[in-house]
Structure formats: structure tokens, C-alpha cells
Image (spheres, grey):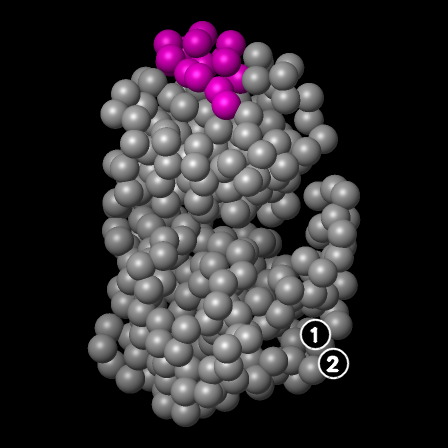
């Protein structure tokens, strides 16, 4: 397979990695298993243009992306649009998509696993046409991301600590917003106040971190929480840690192939998060699943099933 590897030198753990030595190791592992691989080291500012170039190259069959969650999400979009396979090198903070693919989190082990990986079909979702592989969120999570990003992060660990600090500070005054929700054309709620709405690309599994254990169910997971007091916030944190979000008494959970959200009182400053990146929140958002349309390289064995 002809593979283009794009490593974001500004993203995730790659910031503190000897990328020249790592690139040599990566190339040797893939050549050993019969692949033709070229590697490009880029800054965050050049990432999108480099990904687009790889997507437009008819000779490239797969794109290997290394970096944080934003890098992986951008690479997934290009791979999906161009019909190429995506290989995920987990170099971010949580690496949720890589975890669902069962890619080892240690970079050395990830290289070996990806070099012998097989192509599988998994789902991708879109929010008003913008693709995502993990989730679209309104309310609590975008606030935490905003608070976290106001702080400087010298390492993956400091970023995780900043996220925890932001989550704790949000307990004092959880966000509150009004939304209308429809699933597959059927109205669920109208003019209800929420603290959190999350739509996921496949429902969460039972792992400690919130991520799907299957990437090919062909449905979205819809999680919504009405006004969260401090006690409900703590229970929700406990459900998160124990992998029990689907059974949480503080979350309403359902599945659908299409979710429509309307925010009647949205402000111009309002934000949503999509795969961990902040974006402006539009008044109407249509979220759709695209089953089996994203090709990924998954380590051999029982992956995503």
C-alpha cells in the first residue's frame, strides 16, 4: 500500500519527540511489511494544506496522521472525502478514536500494529456538513474546552490537569441553554433547558473514558442532561469513570440516524465543540451518520466488532 504519513510537530506528544529518529523508525516498520511510505513533518499552520495535497494525490492509498485530536479529525475528513484509508497514530491527550480502533497508545507499539493493520469500514458523522469521528457537543463540554484552552500547556499531562480544573470550576455555575430536539424526524423535546447535549458517532461503550466500543453500528448516540446541580454533576462524573453513561440517571440517552437541534436563543458568542475543537454554534444543526463510509487501518484481530 502506498501511504503518506503526515506528522504534526506541534501536536500532542510529538512536540517532545525526536521526530527525525521517529520518522526513521516509522519508515523501517512499514517498508518491512511491504508498504511504500513517505513521511512529511509539518507545523500546525501547514497541516490542512498538506492533508489536502495527500487527499488529491491519486497515487496515495492511505493517509497516516500523527498528532492530537484536531489533527486526527482533520485527517479523517480528508480521507473520507478522497476515499483513502486513514491510519491513526495516537499522539494526543485522550486518543479516543485510536482507543476505539484498539491502536496501542505507546508510539513504538502503535507503529508495529499499524504496519500490519487491515483496512476496515467504520462510520463517520457530519454536523451541518462538517465531519466528525467522535462527537459534537453543546453546553458543558465547550465551556470546559474554552476554560482549558485559556491556560498554557507544556505537556500532555498539564493539558489533562487544565481540563480537570476547568471541569471542577464549571460545577459552580453549569451552562444552561434552550433547545428543540428531533430524532429521525420525531420531536423529542421542545423548548427544554439543558446543561449538556452530546451527539456521538456511535454510542459510548462501557470503557472508563467515553468512547464507542464499536465503530460500525450505523447510528448516532444522543446524550442530553437538563439542569445539572452539583450533586448531579458528581454522579455524572462517577458514571463517566465507571463507563456507565448509557445507564446514567442524569442523562437521557437515545439513538438515531439523524438528529436535528434548534437553539432558539443562540447568541453570536455561543460555541459548540466538534472532536474537541471549538466552532461557532449555529441556530439549527443537522447531524447525520454515514455508515461504513470511512476506511481505517485497524490492527489485526477483533477490531470494532
Element type at mark 1? helix
Q: Are marks 1 and 2 in contact (CB under 8 Å)?
A: yes
Residue 189, relative to residue 285: is it above or below?
below
Which of the pair 247/253 is nearer the observer? 253
Q: Is residue 176 left or right of residue 17?
A: left
Q: For the image shown, how many numbered marks are present on the structure?
A: 2
Looking at the rendered image, the quarter that the N terminus falls into is top left
Element type at mark 2? loop
Whole-percent x and y of residue 34?
A: 37, 9
Q: Is residue 206 left or right of residue 58?
A: right
Residue 167, relative to residue 227: is it above or below?
above
Which of the pair 242/47 is nearer the observer? 47
Q: Is residue 301 left or right of residue 99?
A: left
Whether residue 250 appears in magenta in the rendering, the answer is no
Name the residue: 42% across, 16% down. Answer: 37
Residue 278, relative to residue 261: is it above or below?
above
Q: Which residue is mark 1?
A: 170
Whole-percent x and y of residue 114?
A: 45, 25
Q: Magenta segment range?
A: 26-40
Classed neighbour count for the residue bearing mark 1: other residues with Cα under 10 Å, few (<14), some (14–19), many (≥20): some
Whole-percent x and y of residue 74?
A: 44, 44
Looking at the rendered image, the quarter that the C terminus falls into is top left
Name the residue: 35% across, 40% down. Answer: 78
Whether residue 29 appears in magenta in the rendering, the answer is yes
Asked where in the image residue 155 lies, by quadrant, the reply is top right
Residue projecting furthest to the left? 185
Name the residue: 69% across, 82% down. Answer: 173
Q: Which residue is mark 2?
A: 172
Whether residue 264 appears in this view of the structure is yes
Whole-percent x and y of residue 96?
A: 53, 47
Amino acid at each position: 500500500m502506498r501511504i503518506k504519513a503526515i506528522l504534526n510537530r506541534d501536536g500532542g506528544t510529538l512536540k517532545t519527540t525526536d521526530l527525525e529518529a521517529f520518522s526513521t523508525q516509522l519508515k523501517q516498520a512499514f517498508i518491512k511489511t511491504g508498504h511504500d511510505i513517505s513521511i512529511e513533518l509539518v507545523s500546525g499552520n501547514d497541516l490542512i494544506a498538506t492533508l489536502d495535497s495527500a487527499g488529491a494525490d491519486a497515487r496515495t492509498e492511505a493517509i497516516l496522521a500523527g498528532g492530537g485530536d484536531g489533527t486526527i479529525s482533520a485527517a479523517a475528513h480528508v480521507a473520507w472525502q478522497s476515499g483513502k484509508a486513514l491510519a491513526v497514530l495516537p499522539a494526543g491527550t485522550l486518543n479516543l478514536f485510536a482507543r476505539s480502533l484498539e491502536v496501542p497508545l505507546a508510539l513504538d507499539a502503535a507503529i508495529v500494529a499499524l504496519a500490519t493493520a487491515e483496512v476496515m469500514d467504520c462510520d463517520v458523522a457530519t454536523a451541518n456538513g462538517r465531519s466528525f469521528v467522535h462527537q459534537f457537543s453543546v453546553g458543558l463540554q465547550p465551556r470546559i474546552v474554552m476554560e482549558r484552552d485559556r491556560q498554557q500547556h507544556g505537556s500532555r499531562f498539564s493539558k489533562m490537569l487544565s481540563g480537570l480544573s476547568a471541569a471542577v470550576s464549571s460545577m459552580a455555575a453549569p451552562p444552561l441553554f434552550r433547545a428543540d430536539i428531533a430524532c429521525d424526524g420525531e420531536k423529542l423535546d421542545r423548548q427544554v433547558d439543558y446543561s449538556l447535549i452530546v451527539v456521538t458517532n456511535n454510542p459510548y461503550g462501557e470503557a472508563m473514558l467515553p468512547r464507542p466500543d464499536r465503530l460500525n453500528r450505523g447510528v448516532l448516540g444522543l446524550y442530553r442532561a437538563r439542569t445539572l446541580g452539583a450533586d448531579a454533576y458528581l454522579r455524572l462524573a462517577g458514571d463517566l469513570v465507571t463507563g456507565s453513561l448509557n445507564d446514567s440517571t442524569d442523562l437521557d440517552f437515545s439513538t438515531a440516524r439523524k438528529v436535528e437541534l434548534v437553539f432558539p436563543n443562540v447568541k453570536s458568542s455561543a460555541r459548540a465543540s466538534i472532536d474537541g475543537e471549538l466552532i461557532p454554534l449555529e441556530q439549527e444543526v443537522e447531524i447525520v451518520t454515514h455508515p461504513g463510509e470511512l476506511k481505517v487501518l485497524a490492527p489485526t484481530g477483533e477490531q470494532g466488532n
